Image (cartoon, grey):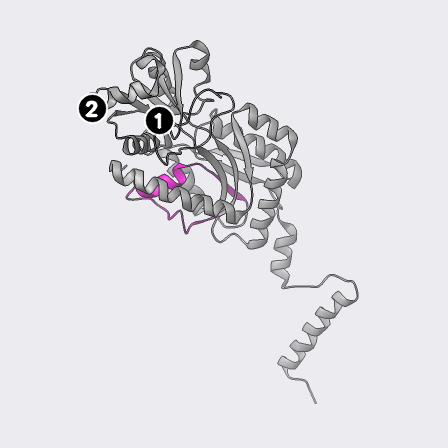
Amino acid sequence: MQKSRSTQRRSVLRGLAGLGALGLPALGPPSLAHAQEAWPSRNLRFVVPFAPGGASDLIARLTAQHLSERLGRSVVVDNKAGAASVIGTAEVARAAPDGYTLLLAPPPFVITQFAYPNLPYDPERAFRPILLLVTSSSMLFARTDLGDGDYRKIAEIAKARPGALTYGSPGNGSLPHVAFELLKLRAGIDVLHVPYRGGGPAALDLAAGRIDLMISSPLDMAAHLQSGRVVPIANASARRNPAFPNVATLQELGVADYDSSGWFGVMVPAATPDAIAARLTEEFSAVLAMPAVRERFQQLGVETAGGTAASFAAHLAAERVRWREAVRAARIEVQ
């Protein structure tokens, strides 16, 4: 009697399963097995949502170089700047979820969902986390002739003369903008925001004395620190910066529950297959473990982070709580 199709199918599946018992590789659905074996079969694109030359660009290029060596495929850094990281992030949200398009995600990845009413993607649904790459300290800087470089004196000026002092930022919705608004909320001070088109012009005006204060990274402020035209008056992160051991944190200076540390992580489109996402986490972790990479990051003023996709997801959740509060309190809205 001729076997039914279902019986034939069961026999074939039993036969395929039996290959494993003979020491031969088990066979799965051909297309899926081929896709997983083949990845990566072409070059990868690492989208940086900022212009070339900044800290984000340096971090991406360093990791891309070593990732390329591990994967045997080029990892090409693609700078897509604009709209506080929205332009580059939106491009990755639209990309095929095949593991060939990666995003270097900065703090605005979280901030923009509260500041932009018409964001062209849902950051919580359109992406899946790979891992947290690095963290970096932020510092509060002042022009050198303001309040003797003493945070408490400057805070008293801001309280006594609301709106008289000014602070600069790279633009509306940027981390330094929202971080300073959080400081105003926590410290009860009133300082006028002056937005710029990028952190460089803002830092130049701080050094020239045209604005009074700015939250930035020591790396981005390095040239002005060397010239003595700006002074760090507080650490805006939860821990002191080893390069500035005598500069207290804002929490130590009485600003409760304040932390505006910078960070960069890696994201991919949400529907990226589990196996590819896990491989990316593994490969990036291996890059971060390289002594040469850790040393170079330290020179750039950032610390390697690493961990798992789950720990990065938890980090993002905590960031959303912090910046949702700051954006809403300051009524920040970017069109």
Q: What's the residue type where badge 2 is placed?
A: Pro
Residue 8 position, x and y percent, is: 67, 79
Q: Which mark is residue 292?
A: none
Kindly state the secondary structure of the residue where label 2 is placed: loop
How crowded pointer 1 is (Cα within 10 Å; few <14, some 14-19, many 20+) is rated as many
The answer to whether 288 appears left or right of 147 in the picture is right
Q: To which residue does mark 1 refer? A: 170
Q: Which residue is mark 2?
A: 162
Residue at 28%, 43% (x, y): give it.
117
Residue found at x 50% / y 29%: 57
Highlighted range, magenta: 100-128
Q: Nearer the viewer, mark 2 or mark 1?
A: 2
Q: Position of residue 18 (x, y in %)?
A: 74, 70
For the residue marked with disc 1, what is the amino acid? Pro
Check disc 1 and report its element: helix, strand or loop.
loop
The answer to whether residue 28 of the structure is visible from this angle is yes
